[in-house]
Image (tube, rainbow, N blue to C red):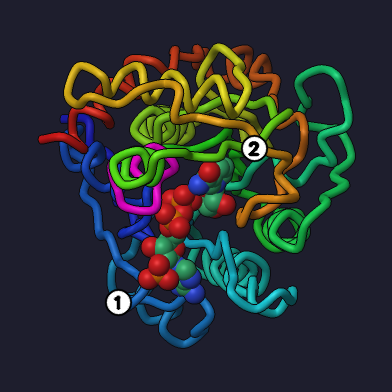
Amino acid sequence: MFELPALLVVGAQGQLGYEVEVLAREQGFSVTALDHAQLDILDSAAVVAALAEYKPKFVINAAAVLNALEPQLASYAANTRGAAILAENCRAAGCAMIHLSCAEVFAGDLNEPYVEDQDPAPLTLYGQSKARGEELVRAALPHHIILRTGWLFGVRSGSFVRELLEQARKQEQVYIADGLVGDPTPAADVARVVLAMIKQLDSGAEGWGTYHYSASESVSWFGFAEAIIATARQYADISLERLLTRPQAQLPMRQRPVNSRLDCDKILCTFGIHQRAWRSGLMQVVRNYYS
Ligand SMILES: NC(=O)c1ccc[n+]([C@@H]2O[C@H](COP(=O)([O-])OP(=O)(O)OC[C@H]3O[C@@H](n4cnc5c(N)ncnc54)[C@H](OP(=O)(O)O)[C@@H]3O)[C@@H](O)[C@H]2O)c1
């Protein structure tokens, strides 16, 4: 019988790590999922021990720091040094790694979706740390996939969808950043893509490298917020009029590139992976919030 490869998911309690673990189990992978408390990817000895104990064929690095409290690059060490520690030890252990990244490695000043080989020019410390992490993974491990994805949302707390629904429940007015455009992407959909790539790579497909995947239908951040509220109205009495725009610099949020759109042709041409629309994923996440 065809045997699926053993997986190790790190950062397993995050939005993406959680969905990868759930879907991998559903699909019959042998999967070990470790959260931050179980494995700190900055702890080199612990990473070596985990690889030796679980003997994965693929490591999925869903661990990251997205919003560090201290505004310095060192606060994002999980995205840089942590990625490097994982990649170096994957190489030593003979396993491959799927490393997650994002559109924030780009400046966002283009008026079209970014393709994979455009030069990174991050605007923020987070973006810088993700770009540096990518470089370190490429340098340490030939058998890697770097998968940049769009505005991720899922059922875990901390997701923009859940936070917006919380705010809309508690506040009369909710301010949304103006002038940003991107691709909302359900975490469960990215999990599907990660596992589809792993199956093909495990069967000998030659596809190592950097890819973009986001769900289809680019939208403004405000348009996404409107879609969230419109979807929620079947469960709760929330008026769209509660949503107001503000320049992002006036809001307590990580500053995003104006354009976070990703071109997803390469993943289609190499792996045959098609973009799905984000709206059905949104319905599931909103339903989960009210259930
Ligand atoms: N969220 C987005 O909009 C978005 C968009 C594009 C790409 N991405 C990328 O997708 C990946 C997953 O993001 P996400 O949204 O799932 O993030 P998330 O929900 O914040 O999850 C990240 C997880 O990593 C864990 N972590 C942090 N430092 C760690 C360390 N040193 N060792 C082990 N685990 C550690 C965190 O645990 P604690 O919370 O316990 O520290 C958390 O559970 C990241 O690479 C991110 O850059 C995210």
Left or right placement of residue 177 versus residue 160 in this view: right
The quarter of the picture where residue 67 lies is bottom right
**Residue 209 x, y percent position in the rendering:** 68, 38
**Which badge, 1 or 2, is on the more N-terminal residue?**
1
Res. 271 visible in picture: yes
**Residue 37 x, y percent position in the rendering:** 32, 78
In this view, the mark in front (1 or 2):
2
The quarter of the picture where residue 241 lies is top left
* Residue located 88% across and 32% down the image: 109
* Residue located 16% across and 34% down the image: 290
The amino acid type found where label 2 is placed reads Ala
Position of the C terminus by quadrant: top left
Instruction: Read off the magenta span.
Output: 154-162
Q: Nearer the viewer, residue 242 or 64?
A: 242
Count the numbered circles shown: 2
The amino acid type found where label 1 is placed reads Gln
Q: CA distance from mark 1 to mark 2?
A: 36 Å
User: In what element is the residue under mark 2?
Assistant: strand
Q: Residues within 10 Å of mark 2 (few under 14, many from 20)?
A: many
* Residue located 60% across and 18% down the image: 219
Q: Which residue is mark 2?
A: 177
Q: Residues within 10 Å of mark 1 (few under 14, many from 20)?
A: few
Q: Which label number is shown at residue 38?
A: 1
Q: Is residue 5 magenta?
A: no
Q: Main secondary structure of the magenta part?
A: loop
User: In what element is the residue under mark 1?
Assistant: loop
Q: Nearer the viewer, residue 245 or 153?
A: 245
